[in-house]
């Protein structure tokens, strides 16, 4: 099972080698869901490797605990190998299939697409909107739509959002068809609460209860906490958007809304929390040990964090500048960033959220249908 450390090898093949070693050792059984999932197994086909790669939360506890890590001849580096498998898995399951090549060039594709869409939006507004409107101070209801008409704004955001939802959903379905177990619907429904609890609490970022090795051998809950803050902020921005839509269509009151209104309060707090979560995750990413990391996944992490930060910051800029002459330009830039983000979203690390949820559901199903595990002394 050993190999020279510099031997080039396919990620899935290397993952199978390492998983066989880990299944025999099981020293890291308590760290995350991966090790209970491999207990007692001797073979790992590609579908199983895909499942385990996305079940891995990259807490890196096994890297620091492993007695077979380099310079041992077994050269076990499970976090980096499973990260590489995740990249390949994204490319295999992404829909439409022509997006597969984007994962190898995600950084510059994100920058080019979002930048081009934002610049195009800015150019169109500069051409189509008179300067006295674009640079005017608008405080009455419907002020945003004097710069960008409601129909154009909703069409651009709605169509790009629909594309992102359909593409991500199709990729997730393709992934589930690969990893989904043969289990009756009643078992799947029974497993849902446990899987949802794992998704919401991020239990597997707890490193078995003592925290993860976010930035080295020292245990911490920084990445878990930052994830929670980021998701809470994202949820509040959705609440802001939905409440604004209800006010617009139900009460007939167009944006912008008062500072103490639900859309503004939720949007402001949501944007601040998103930036705080991004900052926390970026700090972890910057300080993290590179040895158990896959460079391609690191680039994807940074790319997604940059997208989320740009979206949140540009949204907060609109809220902060809405009663000034800069509102029109801020609104245009925010709309361009949002539309560009939706367009590239299916080819970013955002896929890890539904893929990991699917992997956790598979693990919860396996726990229900698998025979009870026995300790070594029984």
Image: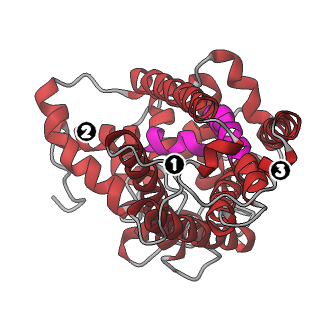
How packed mark 2 is, by other alpha carbons closer than 10 Å (few <14, some 14-19, many 20 or more), is: some
**First in residue order: circle 1 vs circle 2:** 1
Q: CA distance from mark 1 to mark 2?
A: 21 Å
Residue 149: numbered disc: none
Q: In what element is the residue under mark 1? A: helix
What span is in magenta? 335-356
How packed mark 1 is, by other alpha carbons closer than 10 Å (few <14, some 14-19, many 20 or more), is: some
Of marks 1 and 2, the one in the foreground: 2
Q: CA distance from mark 3 to mark 1?
A: 69 Å
Residue 132: numbered disc: 3
For the N terminus, give its image quadrant: top right
Decide which of 236, 102 is in the foreground and name it: 236
101 horizontally vs 160: left or right: right
Q: Quadrant of residue 51?
A: top left
What colour scheme has been applied to the protein in the rendered image? secondary structure
**First in residue order: circle 2 vs circle 3:** 3
Q: Residue 28, can we see it? A: no
Q: In what element is the residue under mark 2? A: helix
Q: Quadrant of residue 120?
A: top right
Q: Is residue 337 magenta?
A: yes
Query: What percent of the width, then of the height, locates residue 375?
Result: 21, 59
Q: Is residue 339 magenta?
A: yes
At a point 74% along the width and 52% down the height, the residue shown is 328
Decide which of 12, 303 is in the foreground and name it: 303
Q: In what element is the residue under mark 3? A: helix
Query: What percent of the width, then of the height, locates residue 362?
Result: 32, 37
At a point 40% along the width and 20% down the height, the residue shown is 177
Query: What percent of the width, then of the height, locates residue 366?
Result: 25, 38
Q: Which residue is mark 1?
A: 21
Q: CA distance from mark 2 to mark 3?
A: 63 Å
């Amino acid at each position: 099972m050993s190999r020279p450390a510099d031997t080039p090898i396919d990620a899935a093949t290397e993952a199978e080698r390492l998983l066989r070693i880990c299944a025999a050792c099981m020293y890291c059984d308590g760290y995350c869901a991966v090790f209970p999932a491999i207990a007692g197994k001797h073979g790992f086909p590609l579908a199983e490797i895909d499942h385990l790669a996305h079940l891995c939360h990259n807490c890196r506890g096994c890297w620091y605990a492993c007695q077979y890590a380099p310079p041992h001849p077994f050269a076990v580096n499970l976090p980096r190998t499973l990260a590489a498998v995740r990249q390949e898995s994204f490319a295999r399951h992404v829909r439409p299939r022509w997006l597969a090549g984007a994962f190898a060039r995600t950084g510059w594709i994100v920058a080019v697409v979002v930048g081009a869409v934002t610049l195009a939006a800015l150019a169109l507004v500069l051409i189509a909107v008179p300067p006295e409107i674009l640079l005017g101070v608008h405080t009455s209801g419907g002020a945003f739509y004097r710069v960008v008409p409601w129909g154009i704004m909703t069409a651009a955001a709605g169509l790009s959002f629909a594309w992102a939802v359909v593409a991500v959903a199709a990729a997730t379905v393709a992934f589930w068809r690969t990893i989904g177990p043969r289990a009756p619907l009643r078992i799947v429904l029974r497993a849902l609460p446990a899987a949802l609890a794992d998704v919401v609490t991020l239990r597997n970022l707890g490193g078995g209860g003592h925290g993860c090795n976010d930035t080295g051998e020292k245990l911490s809950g920084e990445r878990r906490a930052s994830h929670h803050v980021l998701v809470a902020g994202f949820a509040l921005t959705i609440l802001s958007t939905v409440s604004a839509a209800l006010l617009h269509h139900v009460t007939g009151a167009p944006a912008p809304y008062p500072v103490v209104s639900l859309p503004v309060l939720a949007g402001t707090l949501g944007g601040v929390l998103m930036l705080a979560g991004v900052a926390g995750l970026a700090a972890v990413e910057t300080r993290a040990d590179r040895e158990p990391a896959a460079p391609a996944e690191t680039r994807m992490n940074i790319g997604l964090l940059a997208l989320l930060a740009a979206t949140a910051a540009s949204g907060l800029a609109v809220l902060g500048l809405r009663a000034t002459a800069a509102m029109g330009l801020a609104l245009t830039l925010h709309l361009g960033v949002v539309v560009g983000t939706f367009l590239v979203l299916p080819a970013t690390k955002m896929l890890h959220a539904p893929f990991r949820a699917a992997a956790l559901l598979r693990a919860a199903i396996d726990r229900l249908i698998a025979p009870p595990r026995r300790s070594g002394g029984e």
